[in-house]
Amino acid sequence: MMFQSGTLPFLWVSAILIAAAVAPVVNRVFGSRGGWGLALIPVGVVASMLNLWPSVVDMQEVSASVDWVPALNLTVSLRLDGLSLLFGLLITGIGALILIYAAGYLNGDERLGRLWMLLLLFMAAMLGLVLADNLLTLFIFWELTSITSYLLIGFNSDKPESRASALQALLVTGGGGLALLPGLLLLGLAGGSFELSSLLDNAEAIRQHPFYVPMLVLILAGAFTKSAQFPFHFWLPNAMAAPTPISAYLHSATMVKAGVYLIARLQPILGGTTEWFWMIAPVGTITMLLGAWLALRAADLKQILAYATISVLGSLTMLLGIGTEATMSAALAVLVAHALYKGGLFMVAGAVDHAVHQRDIRKLGGLRSAMPVTFAAACLAGLSMSGMLPTFGFIAKETWYEAVGGWAGVSFLTASVLSNVCLVVAVGLVCLKPFFGRGTEATLAAHESGPAMWGPPMMLGVTGFVLGLMPTGISELLSAASHWVVGHAVPVKLALWHGVNVTLGLSLLTLAGGMTMYWQRHRLERWFIGLDVLTQFGPAQMYHRLLTAVNDFARGLTAILQNGYLRFYLLTMVGLTVFSVWMALGSELLSHLKPVSLDFRVHEILLTGLILLASVVAVRARTWLLAVGAMGVVGYSVAGIFVLFGAPDLAMTQFVIETLTVVLFVLAFCRLPDFRRLSSVQTRVRDAVIAVVAGGTITALLLFAMTVRSDHPISDYYSAHSVADAHGRNLVNVILVDFRALDTLGEITVLSIAAIGVYSLLKLRAPKRTDSSDDAAMDSLPAAARRSEGM
Amino acid sequence: MDSVILKTAIRFLFPLLLLSSVFLFLRGHNEPGGGFVGGLVASGAIALYAMAHHVAAARRVLRVSPRVLIGSGLLLSLSCGVAPLLFGRPFLTGLWMKVATKGLGEIHLGTPLLFDLGVYCVVTGVSLVFVFSLLEE
């Protein structure tokens, strides 16, 4: 069953995951050359997807699903249709180039293996997201992209601003994810299924559902945060703290497009209503204009590109929000064009940064002669971004203008032209400014980097040209993808030359306006500075205020709940337990208490007496060792009781645990000061009362449990199925490793987390302040010994 | 702790404890025992060794770091959960096969055994992280 076409989607995702697992080893063995080998995996996925192209274009789909929790109807299902093929090809194709580029960017750096691993993990998450057919599968992959992008953006973890940016991105997109989950659940409940493919049949009922609006708001909150739409756009430029290969991948081709993908994917189910239009199109338009304007304000190469990305994401959202057949096909065309040129431009920016360690365009110039190939790649991408003939960018822009055209769309059209004028200026800032003019101090040492760094952007640029000249193949794919966005077949015919008409006029107007603005940009600057006051009231400030408020609240709460006194924690826990037991079961507990028959055997009485005696000794002990020993006796005696009542497994575990506990206590206590009585008589009386009440409650609870036992204990089921289903005669073990293995998995995870906690408390403390030289000498020796031994 | 009695005792106890730990682990599925208690016995043995000699010596005997034990144990248990998915069965379903051996008769081998091995590794690793951290303080 492994290699039927139905399991191919699973194979793709797992192949990339396996590549991620071996990436660090590849780096250790082959160094940065291994990037070419690792890139073969996504290239293989691309090939496998292209193999399915004919059937997907024929509107067939490849789907696969695995039961996850059959009892709850949870399945992991993946499906390849036109839309996911389009996204999948972008993700894996550009991803392969990024892997090669990353190898050049971090050549010889030991962190390269980690970068590859994270990039591949992200690729797998993103691919899973676009292939997911089940809403919950989609959500899981959605959150995985948030988490992996957090690790990627914070890749330079030694820099505080890098960590802050990563956290900001995680909080914003993760917060959106928290809204998305209830949204998807509502959608699933309203539609009666969690499979996207079956929801399509219920679209009308979902749109009429009373929960339609809340559902839409929640889902769009997820999509807008992920795709950096206004007012959540501020995290994206900050995320540029990541190394460039990451920016090129996350912020051009993939992650930020996840939100756009979600809107496109849900359009046939939720779209076509007035609510849909008014919630999406205006947000997209504002984002488009804001991003374009901010791009002109920035001076950092990557910041300019990031704001330009926000602008394009806004236009994609706007086009999807308008929601006619033409605008949706146009959105897909713009999306492809943008992924190609923006990925390339980011890599160019990275190559410049890598060569001269400077990204401020005011300090760059004259790089053309030193980096001719990079310049060529920049030109290829820039031509496509500005929408010049004969690139794919031109075709996409023409389709866009044509789709929005007509008197109804005049405001959208004006906004589109305005934003594109700004983008043309941005092209000038990124592709011309650093390469022409006089050289600067920074650019003296400029040099061309290896083929790993100029090859990938070159390839993307050339692809943009080839698609522009031969748009037949991509038309086929776009029309197959549109089919799934619109809900029925849409013929998409892209062509380079439409003849002389209004859209061509608008294209020329855009170019002319952009060029004039670039030429006169110094005059605009004064005007911009006046407007900067506005940014003080922006959403970024709101974010910071909110974050500070949350932290202050948490600090206040922590001061009350965790005041650092262990006895206070214990008191709270025991007290709350006793209180809640009596609150919940009080009257029932008392009514069920019956006198127990007193036919004890002698050794039971002896053991109980031993326990009582030992606990009295423990309380009255005057040395640590005696107290620990007495506690050990209590533990062993309890184990003895287990033996008497036929629970050898428990007894055995109790014996060993008791031994280890005594060992740990001895190790810990030999560092404490001598045993002293620090508590007053009063506190000891208080503790005694609490202990008696707590013990009495538990005793009552146990007696109660004995009386209300039902006729069919669950153990009957276990003993009947143990040998038959789980091949084991030891019930306890069978429960642990088979019937309730998920619990065990959770428990060992908790154990591991506890171990990490203990380790970091004891080992990773910040070095003590050295008040006197004596202390320093005392401390440094064991610390050094510890470091050399490692853990 | 520099004690001749402890050192001498450990020389005999250490292999015995380790053997019984393996024994407990292997018989677990049909008789009292299993990964949890087996792992505890193993960590008890190594903890005693570390007390008698030094932590460094105990680390050399253990060969891998406790943290690696924890990680690989978790991964092993988790992969036992994932493996059935590849065969189209739900998460954590036990997969079994019969192996005929000479002398021992027919043996049932299955993923629950590997799952238990994961538990064994995690438990050993966790308690040794505690013991070693405290001993090295």
Image (cartoon, coloured by chain):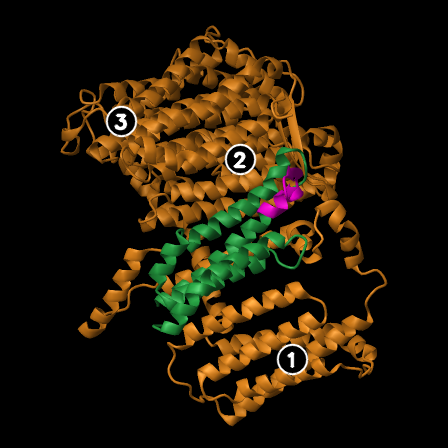
CA separation, marks 2 and 1?
53 Å
Comes first in the chain, label 2 or label 1: 2
Q: Residues within 10 Å of mark 1 (few under 14, many from 20)?
A: some
B109 is within the stretch colored magenta: yes
Q: Earlier in the sequence, mark 3 or mark 2?
A: 2
Mark 3, Cα crowd under 10 Å, few <14 / some 14-19 / many 20+, is few
Spot occupied by residue A599 in the image (x, y as percentages of width and height): 80, 82
Q: Which tag is nearer the camera, tag 3 or tag 1?
A: 1
SS at circle 2: helix
Q: Give chain B's shade.
A: green
* Magenta part of the chain: B92-114
Label pair 3/1, CB-CB below 8 angstroms: no
**Subunit that carries the residue with mark 2:** A
Which amino acid type corresponds to the residue marked 3 in the rendered image? Gln
The residue that label 1 is drawn on is A694
Q: What amino acid is at disc 1?
A: Ala
State which quarter of the image contains the N terminus of chain A: top right
Read off the residue under disc 2.
A259
Question: Residue at image x 15%, y 26%?
Answer: A438
Height in image: A759 above or below A535?
Answer: below
The image's mark for residue A667 is none
Q: Residue furthest right?
A: A711
Chain coloured orange here: A
Q: What element does badge 3 sit on?
A: loop
**The disc numbered 1 marks a residue on which chain?**
A
Q: Is residue B82 left or right of residue B56?
A: right
Label 3 sits on residue: A520
Q: Is residue A427 magenta?
A: no
| Circle 2/circle 1 CB separation < 8 Å | no
Foreground mark, 2 or 1, reads 1
